[in-house]
Image: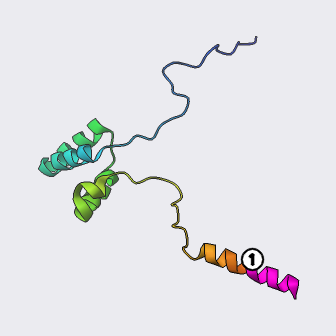
């Protein structure tokens, strides 16, 4: 018996999963709640409610100590772009001159 494939993808599922991001204000709010929570049960309840891990709190605390909200903003993922070398154009020009002089000699 052959089962036919579904005609269309489920509307509940997205084509590509998206990484969840937490805003800096929400991170500060959660850290404030955790700082005022009593005992591990209160902290665990906050983590379960927001779907977080304890390592998130550790990272956010470190970022908060490094620079408050500026440290909590998400960084762009992927390869970082390098600043262009200011001498690159001059180097290319000198290499062309060198090649031209070698040909004429």
Specify few, some or many for label 1: CA neighbours under 10 Å numbering under 14, 14-19, or 20 or more. few
Q: Quadrant of the C terminus?
A: bottom right
Q: Quadrant of residue 21?
A: top left
- 69 w.r.t. 101: above or below: above
Residue span colored magenta: 96-105
- Prevailing SS of the magenta stretch: helix
Residues 19 and 95: in front is 95
Q: Quadrant of residue 26?
A: top left
Q: Secondary structure at mark 1?
A: helix
Q: Which residue is at a point 14% across and 47% down the rendered structure image?
A: 37
Question: In the image, is 16 to the left or to the right of 74?
Answer: right
Residues 88 and 63: in front is 88
Query: Is 101 in the magenta?
Result: yes
- 94 w.r.t. 53: above or below: below
Image x and y of residue 36, in percent: 12, 49
Residues 47 and 88: in front is 88
Residue identifier under label 1? 96
Question: In the image, is 77 to the left or to the right of 24?
Answer: right
Question: Farthest front residue?
Answer: 104
- 11 w.r.t. 28: above or below: above
Image x and y of residue 100, in percent: 81, 80
Q: Quadrant of the N terminus?
A: top right
Q: Which residue is at a point 37% across and 51% down the rendered structure image?
A: 74
Q: How is the image coloured?
A: rainbow
Total numbered circles: 1
Q: Which residue is at a point 76% across and 83% down the rendered structure image?
A: 98
Image x and y of residue 31, in percent: 21, 50
Query: Is 15 in the magenta?
Result: no
Q: Which residue is at a point 16% across and 45% down the rendered structure image?
A: 33
Image x and y of residue 95, in percent: 72, 79
Residues 5 and 22: in front is 22
């Amino acid at each position: 018996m052959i089962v036919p494939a579904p005609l269309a993808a489920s509307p509940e599922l997205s084509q590509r999963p998206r990484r969840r991001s937490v805003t800096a204000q929400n991170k500060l709010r959660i850290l404030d709640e955790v700082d005022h929570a009593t005992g591990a049960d209160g902290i665990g309840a906050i983590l379960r409610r927001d779907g977080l891990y304890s390592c998130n709190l550790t990272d956010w605390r470190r970022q908060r100590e490094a620079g408050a909200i500026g440290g909590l903003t998400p960084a762009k993922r992927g390869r970082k772009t390098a600043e262009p070398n200011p001498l690159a154009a001059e180097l290319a020009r000198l290499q062309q001159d060198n090649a031209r002089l070698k040909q004429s000699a």
